[in-house]
Amino acid sequence: MVKDFFNEFKKFISRGNVMDMAVGIIIGAAFTKIVNSLVADIIMPPLGILLGNIDFSNWFIVLKDGSQVASPYASIEAAKTAGAVTLNIGFFINSIISFLIVAFAIFSLLKVINKLKSEPAPAAPAEPTTKECPHCFSTINIKATKCPNCTSDLK
C-alpha cells in the first residue's frame, strides 16, 4: 500500500505539467523580486518627489511608542529598534503597486498566449478532387476514366 502510494507520487511528480509548474513558480518568484525592485527603486522615488518629497519606504504611523526611545523616529528601522509598534503604510502601497504590475504582466502574457493558440494553423493544401479533360477542357472527377461530356478515354 505504501509502495503504491510512492509509485503514484513518483508518477505524478514526473509528469511534464508538474515540472512546468515548478519552473513557472521559480521564474515567478524571480520576476516578483524584479518587480519589487522596480517599484521600490525606480517608480516610488520619483512618485514621492512629485507628491511632495514623500519617502514611501519610511511612510509609517506610530501606534505605540517604544519602551527605549519616544517618537518621532527617523525611520521604520529606528522605530522597530526602539520597540515601537508601527503601521507601515509605505510598504503596503509598494506591495499594492508591485501586485498591480505583476498582475498586468501576467494578464498581458496570457493574452498573447491565448491569441497565439486561437490563430488557426495554416491549412495544408487540399488534395484535388477534379481534373480537366484534355480533349474538351471540361472539369471532371479526378477518378473518371472516360469524360462524361465528350466521351473521350482518359489516361
Image (cartoon, rainbow, N blue to C red):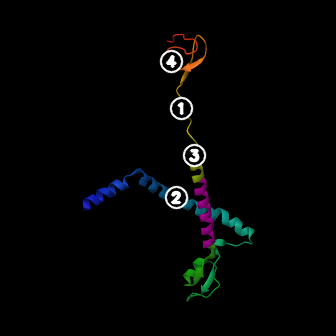
Callout 1 amino acid: Ala
Q: Is residue 20 left or right of residue 128?
A: left
Q: Check whether the beta carbons of the residues at disc 4 and disc 1 lie within 8 A of each other.
A: no
In the rendered view, would you say 93 is above or below 147? below
Q: State the CA–CA distance, disc 2 to disc 4.
A: 62 Å
Q: Earlier in the sequence, mark 4 or mark 3?
A: 3
Q: Which of the two discs, 3 and 2, sits closer to the camera?
A: 3
Image: magenta residue range: 92-108
Query: Mark 3 — residue?
Result: 118
Foreground mark, 4 or 3, reads 4
In percent of width and height, residue 144 lies at 50, 18
Q: What crowding class fits label 4: few (fewer than 14 Cα within 10 Å), some (14-19), or many (20 or more)? A: some
Report, in whole angstroms, how far the alpha carbon at label 1 lies from the one at label 3: 18 Å
Using residue 141 as the reference point, say whether residue 73 is left or right of it. right
Identify which residue is drawn at 55% across, 58% down: 31
The amino acid at mark 3 is Ser
Q: Secondary structure at mark 3?
A: helix
Which structural element holds mark 4?
loop
Labelled disc at residue 144: 4
Closer to the chain start, of discs 4 and 1, is: 1
